Amino acid sequence: MSTPTKYQRIAFVAGPSAEAQQALAQLVKAYGNHPSDQADVIVALGGDGLMLQTLHAHMRAGIPIYGMHRGTVGFLMNEFSATGLIERLEAAKLTVINPLLMRATDIDGKVHIHHAINEVALFRQTHQAARLRILVDERERMAELAADGVLVATPAGSTAYNLSVQGPIIPINAALLALTPISAFRPRRWRGALLPNTAFVVIEVLESEKRPVAAVADHDEARDVQRVEIIADKTIAIRMLFDPGHSLEERILSEQFGY
């Protein structure tokens, strides 16, 4: 008698590309397709953009999500195969991540609340550099940063935009966040900081009307912000599945050695 699989009911989601849609048709024919609220696992077919959308959509569901690369960038995805999916799911390793919670208040007093899996970033909206005050755990750490912006990244997001602005790569299981400036003008040599993932980060926008700033949590944007509060939301545990030997932890480690 065969052992029952813990992933008997699979929900598939796919990106709009022909490649992703073809993969969807193949897999649905072979394994069926259950509604996500009745599934044991969600399989996402596409690139990292689709994976982030899927993670956001099912953030509070507690359902593990397994991605297969049928898109452009596939850092968060496993390699695609139309066969052996059940066996791969059974052998997959679980990675749990906590998203960031952003609470941004704009110049009109409106509050915008969003979650970010990769990063919360603040950007200047005009030709003028942003002037920002940074507090960590209610203590002022930088009275003024003049820059194009600043971001707070999770370990999962440390290899994304954070890396492109010379921020540090953080191992996925490290209890850290990256605080990284974007094109810092003053202080000129500041490269950012590593913070404990319990840190409560507040970024205040100085001269917010003269030098407007937008805040973005992954893909959710608030414009003309005056104050942005950021903290890891430990009430949400996002469960991701990766093939053995190709875990997110291994990929992040490999990035530090340039491959």
Image (cartoon, rainbow, N blue to C red):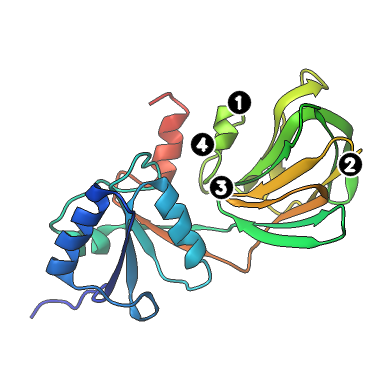
Residue labelled with disc 4: 159
Identify the mark nearer the N-term, 4 or 1.
Answer: 4
Q: How far apart in space, not on screen, are marks 3 and 4 (Cα)?
A: 9 Å
Q: Quadrant of residue 31?
A: bottom left
Tell whether label 1 touches label 4 (CB within 8 Å): no
Q: Secondary structure at mark 2?
A: loop
Residue at far left of view: 1
Q: Secondary structure at mark 1?
A: loop
Residue labelled with disc 3: 118
Residue labelled with disc 2: 209
Quadrant into which the C terminus falls: top left
Front-most of 78 and 11? 11
Identify the mark nearer the N-term, 4 or 2.
Answer: 4
Q: How far apart in space, not on screen, are marks 4 and 2 (Cα)?
A: 33 Å
Q: Secondary structure at mark 3?
A: loop
Q: From what the image shows, is residue 127 above or below residue 76?
A: above
Compared across the picture, whether 42 is left or right of 97 comes to left
Q: How far apart in space, not on screen, are marks 2 and 1 (Cα)?
A: 29 Å
Residue labelled with disc 1: 166
The amino acid sitting under disc 1 is Gln
Q: How far apart in space, not on screen, are marks 1 and 3 (Cα)?
A: 15 Å
Tell whether label 1 touches label 2 (CB within 8 Å): no
Residue 36 percent across, percent down from the top left:
37, 74
Q: Residue 43, can we see it?
A: yes
Q: How far apart in space, not on screen, are marks 3 and 2 (Cα)?
A: 28 Å
